[in-house]
Image (tube, rainbow, N blue to C red):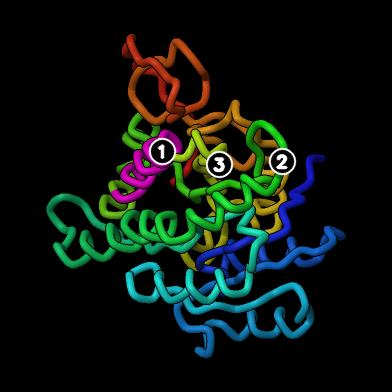
Amino acid sequence: MAEVKACNILITGANRGLGLETVKQLSQDSCPKRHIFATCRDPDGPKSEALRELAKKHPSVITIIRLDADDPCSIKESAKKVGSLLGNSGLNLLLNNAAILAKGTIQTSSVEDLKNTFNTNVIGPLLIIKEYLPYLQTAAKASGTPGMSCNKAAVINISTVGGSISTMPSFYGQFPLLPYCVSKAGLNMLTVLAAEEVKADQILCMALHPGWVRTELGGEKAPLEPKESVEGMLRVIGSLTEKEHGGFLDYTGKTIPCMMQHNTSVQNGCGVHSVYIKSTSKKQAGRP
């Protein structure tokens, strides 16, 4: 099993669901000198009680930071705070996990739902990457090692098969989540373009699908428990190299296709080196 050995890690949406479980698992491993910046919208609110209790158990490992992915000022302030705590070591791993889900179709989705979902699920991660990029660049330079890995410097965007144009149509009748799926397709494109921008800095960037997980967002019918999903994601994260740069994988390490075409080049989903030239009607199984 590949281990996540990153020292300085920032996780958004860390107060519940997958974010909280990720903080929990990373705080319990034996990696020395680890520090986790667990961010959420309202650190003092009732929905953050579990995160506060976890931080009390690991005071030298977990620092709770206010970060609202829907608030550009909050993102800027969080970056300043984290930067002052990082010093010269930089940020090794940025996990863009915060997201909201809005249901609806073309006929039922409101403008407000579309704007809110896009702001949190696309613009938020974009601004977070922008503000934290200097710290990722610092970590990449300080590593002194060639290539890419999540232990060096990386951005992982938590996405979904709901953002896959080739996969989602077959599930749309069962899961009418137009605002959410459109926003996640946007996040997948953001991942590809961000990967193109940061490759010269040797910062790894990719998207990761956690599976259909039994959380507040995933619902009670979801087959996966957060523990199983996060264990899988951390195995994948720990094994990533430049081969997966710009790619889209699920929590088992399987590639998820983004477009309704056949990738004749690198089999890395949304990868920046993909060449799509042949259309196909084949659908991949998955859940939003």
Magenta extent: 183-196
Badge 2 is on which residue? 144
Between the residue at mark 3 and the residue at mark 1, the CA separation in whole angstroms equals 9 Å
Q: Is residue 268 shown above or below 264?
A: below
Name the amino acid, label 1: Glu
The quarter of the rendered structure image containing the N terminus is top right
**How busy is the neighbourhood of tag 3: few (under 14 within 10 Å), some, or many (20 plus)?**
many
Q: Which residue is mark 1?
A: 197
Q: Secondary structure at mark 3?
A: loop
Give the image location of residue 16, x and y in percent: 56, 72
Marks 2 and 1, how far apart in space?
Answer: 20 Å
| Drawn side of residue 77 relative to residue 84, left or right | left
Q: Which residue is mark 3?
A: 203
Q: Amino acid at mark 2?
A: Gly
Residue 272 seen in the figure:
yes
Residues at discs 2 and 1 in contact (Cβ within 8 Å): no
Q: Secondary structure at mark 1?
A: helix
Q: Badges 3 and 1: C-beta atoms under 8 Å apart?
A: no
- Disc on the earlier residue, 3 or 2: 2
Judge by depth and name the residue closer to the eye, 148 or 158: 148
Residue 47 versus residue 287 in the image, above or below: below
Q: Nearer the viewer, mark 2 or mark 1?
A: 2
Q: Amino acid at mark 3?
A: Ile
Left or right: 220 as drawn, with respect to 274: right
Note whether 16 is above or below 272 in the view shown: below
Coordinates of residue 91 in the picture (x, y in percent): 61, 58
Q: Residue at x 39, y 30 (%)?
A: 258
Q: Is residue 64 left or right of residue 4?
A: left
